[in-house]
Every structure is written in structure tokens, then in C-alpha cells.
Image: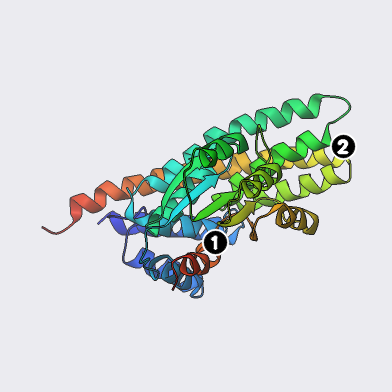
Amino acid sequence: MERNPMRRQLASMRKSLFDQGYLDEQFMELEQLLDDANPNFVEEVVTLYYRDSARLILNLDRALERRPLDFSKLDGLMHQFKGSSSSIGAKKVKAESTLFREYCKSGNAEGCMRTFQQLKKEYATLRKKLETYFQLARQIGPMESANRPK
Amino acid sequence: MTPTLPSGDQASDQDNWDNGRLAHKRQLLTEIILRNRLTALVVDGDTTCRVLEQLLFHSYGVQTQGVDNGRDAIALIASGVKFNLIIIDMILSVLNGLEATRQIRDMGVHCKMLGVTACSGESERQAFLAAGVDVFIEKPLDPEHLVPILRELDGQ
């Protein structure tokens, strides 16, 4: 009996991730692609993304401390980060990455730094939201099995 | 296999608000059946991208190998391994994607090459095509781009 409110909550949470622009269609494609694999695979892919991209964020932070800024190096790092973020459907993060690269191309140091701060905020916000979402999905998963008619 | 999301009400909420695009993309994921055993090389320095691209190929029954830099791609091809398709990113460590592509073509490799990269500018596109890729695709690699190419390679 507890299943339905939780399922509605999960559906609502999921919908708002898309409606508020945190995720785009690529996330849905991931879910379809990984449908035949283990049910937690999407979460595993997202975990992989956050683990790997943490290194890029750190390298970007360090590169932004250097003077003068090496825009070519910054662009290269952000290129990889953008690609990774787009592969999991991280829409807002991807948008900030694109903006950052535009500032790199125009040599706008202040723009780069400001955009990177915003990017880190979006990156952290998405992480928290997805952690909550996957936690609820995992709770519902075992309950589904327990309540399935024999 | 049980999906991450529960079925029933959950699935109908999902389908209602994506206006059929998800259904279309789902169709693309399942509608192709390859007659031949195709092989692909994925050259991407980002682990998440490489894993997902290889998974996408696996879902269509394409055997893949993955490397994370241009030099290893060259070495693999030089060792005699043949591929029907090569996916290569523009910015790679050790040997960048543009130079790796030129060297692969210089080695006499004529298979289909897709430049799949986070770059979206016209100058990047022209540079990658000039280096020798056949198609330039902005990441992420998706079924809508891939399915027609796989069909072509499969002779469908």
C-alpha cells in the first residue's frame, strides 16, 4: 500500500528534473539503453560520471588560478567535461560548459571564472538531486519485488 | 530485466509528457537487426563517454574495442586489427584526434570514421572533416545518427 505514494513521488521528482532543465532527453536515452542491464546501471553510470569529472573540475580550478590564464588548456579541459556531461544528459551543466568555452575563445578571463563558479553550483545541485532520486528508486525497487503477486 | 523506474503508472506519466519522442527513440534502439558481424573502435579520452558509446554499439550487436588516446588507436590499427567503423573524439591526450585521424588515413585505412566530439563550431567541423572523418557528430552519440550508418555498413 505504501508503494503508490512513493511511486508518485518518484515520478514527480523525475518530471521536475526535466521540467526545471536539469536533465535533457539524453538521460531518457540512457534509461532506455540500459533498460536491459541491471536496474541500477543508470545510477552506476552517473556515479562514474561524477567520479571521473571530479578530476576535471580540480584541474580546471588549478588552471584558473594560474596567471596569465592558458585559455587553450582551459578549453581542452572543458571540452572533455562538456562531452562527459552531455553524455548523461546534464543539461544545465552542459550549457555552462558551452558558455565557458565561448569565453575561452574570446579570451575573457572574468567570464571564464564567473561561469565556472556557476557551473560548479549546477554540477553540485544536480548531484544532490540525482542522489535523492536514485535513493528513492532503490527503495521502491525492493518493495516492488516483495509485493509482486506470486 | 526490471528497469530503474517501476512500471505501470510511472511509465504512462513518462510517455505522456515527452510527446512521443521517447517512443520514437526507443524504436530506433530496437528496430535495427544487423545481418553481419560489425566491429567498431571507440577512441575517447573520457571514460563515461567511452563506456556509453561502447554500450550503444553493444546494444546493436556491434563488437567494440575502446582506447583513451590517439597513440593507442594508431598502435592497435598498425597491429593489423580491422574495424568497420571508428569513432574518434577531437581532443585526446598523447596524440590528438585530428592528427590521429590523418595518420589512420595515411595508413590506408578507408573504413567509416565518425568524429564524435563536444565541439560544435563550424571551424572544428571543417577541420575534422579535412583530417579525414566522414561524418562529424556533436556529442552525445545517439541512435538517430548511428542507426543509418550501421544500416549502411551492414548493406541494408
Which image quarter holds the C terminus of chain A?
A: bottom left
Q: Is residue A10 visible?
A: no
A143 or B74, which is in the foreground? B74
Q: Is residue B131 above or below residue B146?
A: above
Which image quarter holds the N terminus of chain A?
A: bottom left
| Within-10-Å neighbours for mark 2: few <14, some 14–19, many 20+ | some
Amino acid type indicated by mark 1? Glu
Kindly check if marks 1 and 2 are in contact, taking CB atoms under 8 A apart as contact. no
| Within-10-Å neighbours for mark 1: few <14, some 14–19, many 20+ | some
Residue at the (85%, 42%) spot, across then down: A111
Q: Which residue is mark 1?
A: A25
Q: Quadrant of residue B100?
A: top right
Q: How is the image coloured?
A: rainbow
Alpha carbon of mark 1 to alpha carbon of mark 2: how far? 32 Å
- Mark 1: which secondary structure? helix
* Residue A38: percent from left, percent from top: 32, 48
B19 or A44, which is in the foreground? A44
Left or right of B8 in this view: A145: left
* Residue A16: percent from left, percent from top: 54, 58
Residue A109, numbered circle: 2
B47 or B37, which is in the foreground? B37
Amino acid type indicated by mark 2? Ala
Are tags 1 and 2 found on a single chain?
A: yes
Q: Is residue A2 above or below residue B153?
A: above
